[in-house]
Amino acid sequence: VPIEPDLSSCGESTVDAGTTCMNVPCCPPKLKDSKIIDFEPPLGCKIRYRPAAHLVDRDYLYKFESAMERMKALPVDDPRNFMQQANIHCAYCNGAYSQVGFPDQKLEVHYSWLFFPFHRMFAMPFWNWDSPCGMTMPQIYLDPYSPLYDENRNLEHQPDVLVNLNDGKSFVKPKKKDDFYELTKREQINSNLYVMYQQMVRSAKTASCFHGAAYLGGCVSETDIGCTPEPRGGTIENGAHIAVHKFVGAKNPPYNEDMGNFYSAGRDPLFYAHHGNVDRMWNIWKTLPGKKRHDFNENVWLNSSFLFYDENANMVRVKVRDCLDSKTLGYDYQSVDIPWLRSKP
Ligand code: C2O
């Protein structure tokens, strides 16, 4: 059956770092009127374009910063408060919910075919890390006086260190073979472009390679997640997506907040730009040639659902089938060059 979070089951999230563990409260605030409404796509015919974060103009930045400031200034128990956005992510990733109908089964939105649909709800201007000009943390997030700033980051990777999309390792063979050899900028860029080609094209020929494995309600398996012997995320989720999280998060064991851990990742405004680009990859993937490069059509996937508060503080149930096409949701991405399409390793 499709996966659904059981709102009444919401409890503390468990954050496990292997050697140590803690519980964090992340449940959504309860409102007096707890009616859940089903999501309806906006009627407007105007498509809004989400810009690349390194290309935004002053007007856009001004509006974006004011919006962020206002979200941060809302009362803490207002479901639209910025911290509550972070908590949504925490609740869905760290076992706060059980599944409807299966009180013993925790709900998890990573490492499966729920990854892209769930995170679609979080997308904003995008961090264009798949293209050379976007491979460092975008400037607009780095001003300590801006509401887009977060002090819990790896300062050694700021302001202009190139991200490594292969999680620390190189995809190109450096000329000198010693472990401490550092890639030149050129080599790092090429390595990243190869990684993108690999994860978007070569290894992502089917929906389950790109999205990740099926994850069904009530399915009991050794790992308690999904119907595969192991939870399995898709190429981008496991690859560039995780690498960028680790690149931004502080070198601060055991939890590497904020971006280095799912429970705290949404506290960094950069999280939304990161997921903007992850989301953009879903749009791009569907346009690439290949007979099997399209979304799943199984109803158990299409009818799985998540709960979010909307801008009027109403709780809304969004099904996977509601969010397959970003244009139906009223947005698309600024079109920029996609250099990795020409970068076969
Ligand atoms: Cu829910 Cu990038 O993680």
Image (cartoon, rainbow, N blue to C red):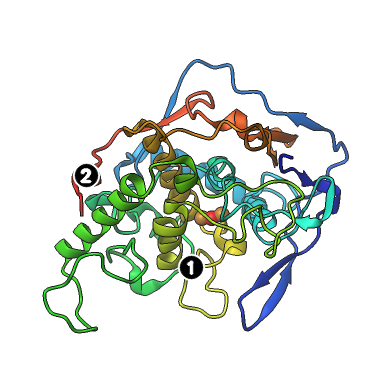
Location of mark 1 (residue)? 151
Q: Position of residue 84 (x, y in %)?
A: 67, 52
Residue 144 visible, this angle: no
**Nearer the observer, 32 or 70:** 32
Q: Nearer the viewer, mark 2 or mark 1?
A: 2
Residue 339 numbered tag: 2
Which residue is rendered at x = 81% and y = 54% of the image? 10
Which residue is rendered at x = 67% and y = 48% of the image? 74
Say what secondary structure mark 1 lies in: loop
**Nearer the observer, 113 or 331:** 113
Image-based side of 96 in relation to 202, left or right: right
**Residue 239, picture quadrant:** bottom left
**Residue 224, picture quadrant:** bottom right
Residue 219 visible, this angle: yes
The amino acid type found where label 2 is placed reads Pro
Q: Position of residue 106 (x, y in %)?
A: 75, 57
Image-based side of 293 in relation to 115, left or right: left
Residue 255 numbered tag: none
**Nearer the observer, 105 or 273:** 105
Reading the chain from its start, which is encountered first: label 2 or label 1?
Answer: 1
The amino acid type found where label 1 is placed reads Glu
Q: Position of residue 21 (x, y in %)?
A: 68, 77
Label 2 and label 1: CA atoms lie apart by 32 Å
Q: Position of residue 248 (x, y in %)?
A: 42, 65
Which residue is rendered at x = 11% and y = 74% of the image? 175
Which residue is rendered at x = 45% and y = 68% of the image? 153
Quadrant of the rendering where the N terminus is positioned:
top right
